[in-house]
Image (spheres, rainbow, N blue to C red):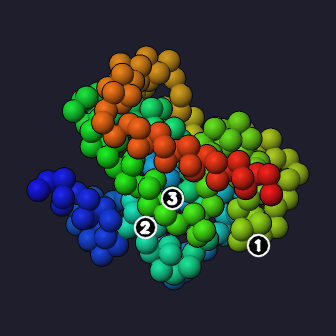
Amino acid sequence: MKLFLRKLIRNSPFAFSLYLSIVRPPVRGRMPDRSTQLHLTGFPRSANTLAMRMLHEFFPALAISTHIHTIASLKLALKYNIPTVVLVRDPVSTITSLVVMRANGDASYVSTFIRDYVDYNEYVESHLDSFTIFSFYELVSEPKKLVRLVAETVRLDFDETNFDRRMAKVYKVMDIAEDNREAHVSQLPNADKERLKKEYVKLVESHPLFERAQRVYSVLMEEVDSSSNN
């Protein structure tokens, strides 16, 4: 029953909006609505925060819905025909990172998170014609590509002058935000977090849903490759 209710809430725009307003205030993210110009989303631990800070730096007036991480927000983006960019990361790195950060290393959450990962990304897969997929790894290595993509998607001018200097500003803001965080809950990579993540790799890879998680990730990455070649 608990799993059924969790899935029901996460998949329903009405129920999840109610959950945000009652159970989990205040929330940094916002659900898409008619005023939203871009829905920037993705499963947790997929560099959502980095992407959000980047876009706020380069397009400060852009109305972005972000940090919801549920099918409910994707359904609203479809309802309002909002351009949507979905960030995607491989299941092992994503789920181990989520266990370390959100579950404080409680291995019993592996099943919950891998089920959420499969549900979320299979929904994305079923609507590939409506969403733009962007790789976590490409965002980290070539952030300018995401900014260009968003500029083209929402038809904004993108001045590439001083890009590296402005990105340094973004990274500095993130560093400051992380100063008071413990290493395992940091948004940024660090040795302690990577060491903790390794403890859960086998649990993820041996889970009955891992093949489905890996399959849908491969499909989404094929979409990324296909878009890059066009």
Residue at (21, 33) in percent of width and height: 108
Residue at (50, 18) in percent of width and height: 191
Residue 170 lies, in percent from the top left, at 66, 44
Residue tagged 2: 73
What secondary structure is found at the residue carrying circle 3? helix
Q: Which amino acid lies under the numbered mark 2 shown in the image of this protein? A: Ser
Q: Quadrant of the C terminus?
A: bottom right
Q: Is residue 63 visible?
A: no
Q: Quadrant of the N terminus?
A: bottom left
Residue 178 lies, in percent from the top left, at 49, 35
What secondary structure is found at the residue carrying circle 2? helix
- Between the C-alphas of marks 2 and 1, the distance is 22 Å
Residue tagged 1: 155
Q: How many marks?
A: 3
Residue 181 lies, in percent from the top left, at 41, 32
Do tag 2 and tag 1 residues touch (Cβ < 8 Å)? no
- Between the C-alphas of marks 3 and 2, the distance is 15 Å
Q: Toward which corner of the image does residue 138 lie, by quadrant?
A: top right
Q: Residues within 10 Å of mark 2 (few under 14, many from 20)?
A: many
Question: Is tag 3's residue or tag 2's residue first in the polypeptide sequence?
Answer: 2
